[in-house]
Amino acid sequence: MKKFTLFLLVICISAMAMAQTKFAKAPLKSMPAQAIKNQILPVQSVNPITNSKAVQEDILGSTIYDMQTNGAIQNRMYVYPDGTMAGTWIRGTDVGSQRGTGYNYNDGTSWGDPPTTRIETRRAGWPSYSPWGTNGEMVVTHDDILGLIVCKRPTRATGAWTQSILAGPTGAVDISWPRMITNGPTNNYVHVIATTYSGYMGLDDSYALLYYRSLDGGTTWDKRNIILPGMDSTIYGGFNGDEYAWGTPFGDTIYFAVSGPWIDTFIMKSIDNGETWTKTTVLSNANKKLPASVTYVAPFRNSDGAVAVEMDHNGVIHLAFGIGGGSMTAGTRYITINQNGLVYWNTTMPMIQDSLDLDVLEANGQLLGYVSDGPNPGDTIVGAPSYRVGLSSFPQISIDEWNNLYFIWAAVTPGNPSPDPFNYRHIWGRGQVPR
């Protein structure tokens, strides 16, 4: 822990020094707003830059499937109290049928050999990992047709996975892009959010975001296909895949964040294990529910959909998301990528101003990170692959037992572009001690 904290402190100092330079700009790009499940990005050339040795780096496995998320990152790794760890990712050895979950386990000393197969028997994607039972583990992914694939086994790192299907509602069975957490005395309460892969219950601009709950480890589901209060078609036109993320449960308190270019940014929280919910709006979006007569919307700034959320030991919820935006032309909605800035917010703050001006965010203590031009000639943004997000995005938040906050994100970095030419993304971090 001391080494990790020191590393982040060094990065934090670097980030503060970076604040004295100007905000970088890159050519903005537009792409269709709706996410699709079979996007294939071109295989990128190998990064020739020497890896940093400031932190330990281990290889869990490999993949050629580069689109690990459309926005927010799932809970794909878990550190157990005894120091063991499990990690998952979308593993693909081709661009089609062999896609599934890659799994590896650290026994407290080292990681195992990279896997040679996926854990599912069917093509799958977007794994979400959590502990299950007294000593087991669970992974939920989406199938291309049937709904969600629930894989579990009673002893982690060993034994066969059992597999079952959690289907969506009639007419929208193919629910996708799941997020799953477990809680309870034996991690036997399972909570899942996922989107339909078609319009449902009037949420036809994109998809519906549904809630599921099991109180017996995924054997039965007492809550299915639930559109939570404040998330229906009277308020929103629809939700997109991967624009939502769970935070770590605290007893019966569970919560998740939702954020995207065409919706509000908000937090849903339950203090009674999913029976009732309250909604806290963080950033309001005037374009979240447009009349059918609207066919043009001028470009606007908003979240890019890559959101992370965690609650500290004092009950304060912390949120981070990248900046994106959208527009509409001839009735077709688009998202804007390559916007600059990573936003921070917590539940002690007022709502974020919808301009998302970087200077205003910085003045209010809400600019967590951004990309700046480097000090040398040529240290500018050449280009960035279309990962549907901003220049600074894919945030993750961790909170340790002393209530220290750690933020990690990926950002396009000026200088030393690839042959494509694209600027490489690097991992950046920042730490914050409790006040």
Image: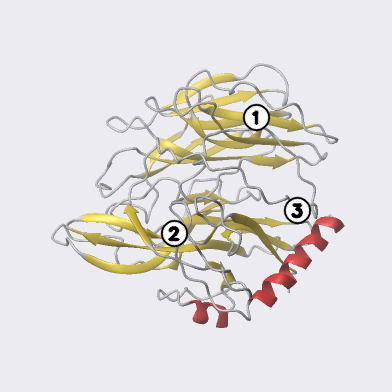
Disc ID at residue 103: 1
Identify the residue at image location x=73%, y=20%: 158
The correct choice, above or below, for 282 with respect to 137 in the image is: below
In the rendered image, the quadrant that contains the C terminus is: bottom right
In this picture, residue 240 sits left or right of residue 347: left
The reply to whether discs 3 and 2 touch (Cβ–Cβ < 8 Å) is no
Name the residue carrying label 3: 52
Judge whether residue 218 can be spotted in this image.
no
Q: Of the residues under marks 3 and 2, which one precedes in the sequence?
A: 3
91 or 236: nearer the viewer = 91
- Residue 433, image quadrant: bottom right
Numbered disc 1: secondary structure:
strand
Of discs 3 and 2, which sits in the foreground?
Answer: 3
In this picture, residue 306 sits left or right of residue 38: right
Which amino acid type corresponds to the residue marked 1 in the rendered image? Tyr
Numbered disc 2: secondary structure:
strand
Disc ID at residue 304: 2
138 or 70: nearer the viewer = 70
Q: Of the residues under marks 2 and 1, which one precedes in the sequence?
A: 1
